[in-house]
Image (cartoon, rainbow, N blue to C red):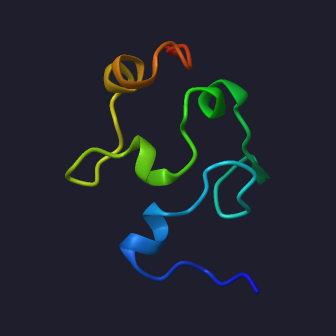
Amino acid sequence: MFSMPNTSIEIKQQVLWLNANICIDKKPIYWQTFIDSGVYFINDILNVRGEFYTFETLISTYGNVCSRLA
């Protein structure tokens, strides 16, 4: 049975893709380019301080997985 993550460790271990807790416009996300690059879990896009990677760090770590919007 599914249970909501309660601790920071449980949150970091959550799968990013098709996760009902991680949505854009109320829809779970799925980005194949990230999956192909080995990005599966929240922890995969966090630095050692638990902060989300910058765009530059994402690109240097996983390659050209996304484009910058702005």
Image side of residue 33 versus residue 64, left or right: right
Image side of residue 11 versus residue 47, left or right: right
Write the residue at 64% across / 27% down.
36
The correct choice, above or below, for 62 with respect to 68 in the image is below
Image side of residue 67 versus residue 48, left or right: right
Write the residue at 44% across / 62% down.
12
The correct choice, above or below, for 30 with respect to 16 in the image is above
Write the residue at 55% across / 19% down.
65
Q: Position of residue 64 (x, y in %)?
A: 51, 12
Q: Position of residue 23 (x, y in %)?
A: 69, 52
Task: Find the residue positioned furthest to the left.
Answer: 49
Identify the image quadrant of residue 38. top right
Q: Position of residue 68 (x, y in %)?
A: 50, 15
Quadrant location of the N terminus? bottom right
Q: Position of residue 5 (x, y in %)?
A: 54, 78
Identify the image quadrant of residue 61. top left
Image side of residue 68 versus residue 57, left or right: right
The correct choice, above or below, for 31 with respect to 23 in the image is above
In the image shown, does 15 or 21 lie closer to the viewer? 15
The correct choice, above or below, for 40 with respect to 68 in the image is below
Q: How many marks?
A: 0
